[in-house]
Image: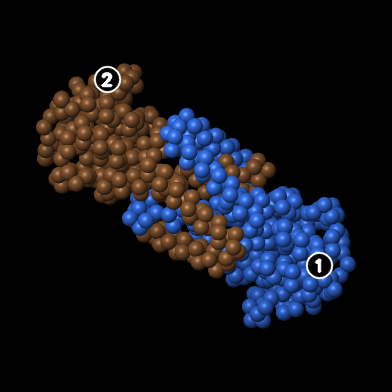
Chain colours: A blue, B brown
Amino acid sequence: MASGKLKHVTIVGVGLLGGSAALALKACHPGLHVAGVGRRRESLDAAAAAGTLDSAHLDAAEAVAHTDLVILATPVGAFERHLRAMAPHLPAGAMVTDVGSTKASVVRAAERVLGRGGPFVGSHPMAGSERKGVAFARADLFDGATCIVTPTRHTPPKLVARAEALWQSLGMRTLRLAPAAHDRAVARVSHLPHALAALLMMLPGDADLPVAATGFRDATRLAGGDPEMWRDIFLTNRVAVLDALDRMDRSLADFRKLVDDADADGIEKFLARAKARRDDTVARTFSDRRVAME
Amino acid sequence: MASGKLKHVTIVGVGLLGGSAALALKACHPGLHVAGVGRRRESLDAAAAAGTLDSAHLDAAEAVAHTDLVILATPVGAFERHLRAMAPHLPAGAMVTDVGSTKASVVRAAERVLGRGGPFVGSHPMAGSERKGVAFARADLFDGATCIVTPTRHTPPKLVARAEALWQSLGMRTLRLAPAAHDRAVARVSHLPHALAALLMMLPGDADLPVAATGFRDATRLAGGDPEMWRDIFLTNRVAVLDALDRMDRSLADFRKLVDDADADGIEKFLARAKARRDDTVARTFSDRRVAME
């Protein structure tokens, strides 16, 4: 689909996100052929029988031979292997993107394997669920959520526009960030809050927990996330996560000093600034759109 | 009310909590006289005109002369002054309690002024609202929430039972903790989460915030609280808050090491333990009762 109609899509990794992308694309592109690539024949066949896929492949090379678009949706650690397998077989004009939740290492690997200046553009559709697997895939998973598209200075503007149009066709709001800026932002607004929720959850003794009320429940909600998925997120975004943890360590020390000094004025000013920024962010960031799960 | 019917109650500090206690007590004790003590004649007169109070006083000494029960509901910093003013005038058999959100310093001051072994028992009804002032007082503010009652080893068991019966008559679930154990528990499950929410809110740059989704919104909800009220909470529970901040600093350093070492197994085990504890706490602590605002 250098331009025009999308006829053939290859989804590599048919889980919750890959399966939902298949369903959503089929819903808005009648006649689209969706080829799925996976490791286990049975689950691919089940997805094909359910109508999520039109063809099932154990080999990415074979699946991409006639494709317009490839979406990588395996864990990010497997991206480079799949890119190497498919590279010699990609048709000219096909676009390659992904759904990985960290971007700098992914984009670097893709540009190394497929070359700079296309056909790869990184994407992070910020949608998901606590549930894993293609059985929970939904055609409306992406609808109303945000997708961050992460071009580099080598990516042709036409390719960026094509990636944005793809996600917008699934009902998403798109946002453009450089890969490193993306990783820094998600480390601060998503990965650090997740780590703190888990640390908060483990801090009280058993005797303290009966006192917990809604504040503790909300502050620890993220600690209920999937440990395996979050382990991979912390590892693949390691450098930006370490930077966010160090910033938190320094601001924790600053706040501790205010309390240790019994600095009433300093504590109140800090809390008032945080409240003003929170109220403003709620009004500006959360009110104009449906907020999806990260 | 050494035993039997409650006839006369004195509320010192007629704001959201004091006013709500007045309304709730009047609703379940027909004929009860509620005397209110405050600093400003106009707001007391308004509360009396609204039927929240039966008599209004600028002087605690005068208000307690014939009372069965005193509830301290001013900011905790003013408790000792009021206790000294009322001490010579308290009838034998009257009980004194409070609604303060920290307990060790409050109980120490009360035992110093009124003596050990009664008539004071500390209470922390965990109910409230973002709204301040008697205008927002509600008879059902306490209904379904938890009240922590904090006797010392000197407090007569009968007095503890009387305080528990009082809060239970307003629909509350009661929990008994020593004052220091109370302060430690609330520092860990309420005050530390509040500080972290404010710190998290201030950490991202302006360019990072458009990426924020529901996780960040929930993790920072507590940062929307009243800065003045929370300043006082951090100051009055300073020692337990510093201990909680130090524990968080140490566990943040432990987690940082796991990420720095790229210790996949260690990260996953930690996240899995936090998830198990979170799931268990949600099932045990939050499911059997309405959870009130702290």
Q: In this view, does B112 lie above or below B176?
A: above
Q: Is residue A113 above or below residue A173?
A: below
Q: How crowded is mark 2: few (under 14 residues within 10 Å), some or many (20 or more)?
A: some
| Chain letter of disc 1 in the image | A
Q: Is residue A256 visible?
A: yes
Q: Residue at x 47, y 29 (%)?
A: A265
| Chain letter of disc 2 in the image | B
Give the farthest residue toward the top: B41
Q: Position of residue A167 (x, y in %)?
A: 73, 56
Secondary structure beneath dot 2 equals: loop
Secondary structure beneath dot 1 equals: helix
Q: Which residue is drawn at 55% across and 68% down?
A: B265
Residue B181: numbered disc: none
Q: What kind of residue is marked 2?
A: Leu
Asked where in the image residue B51 lies, by quadrant, the reply is top left
- Which of the image's four quarters has the N terminus of chain B? top left
Q: How crowded is mark 1: few (under 14 residues within 10 Å), some or many (20 or more)?
A: some
Q: In this view, does A290 lie to the left or right of B48?
A: right
Q: Which residue is drawn at 65% across and 45% down?
A: B208
- Residue depth check, mark 2 versus mark 1: number of the one nearer the observer: 1
Depth order, front residue of B177/A248: A248
Q: What residue is shown with label 1?
A: A113
Q: Position of residue B180 (x, y in %)?
A: 30, 45
Q: In this view, does B48 lie above or below B148?
A: above
Q: Where is residue B257 in the image (x, y as percent from the top left)?
A: 55, 59
Q: Position of residue A4 (x, y in %)?
A: 85, 60
Q: What residue is shown with label 2?
A: B58
Q: Which residue is drawn at 17% across and 43% down?
A: B155
Asked where in the image residue A129 lies, by quadrant, the reply is bottom right
Q: In this view, does B227 lie to the left or right of A94?
A: left
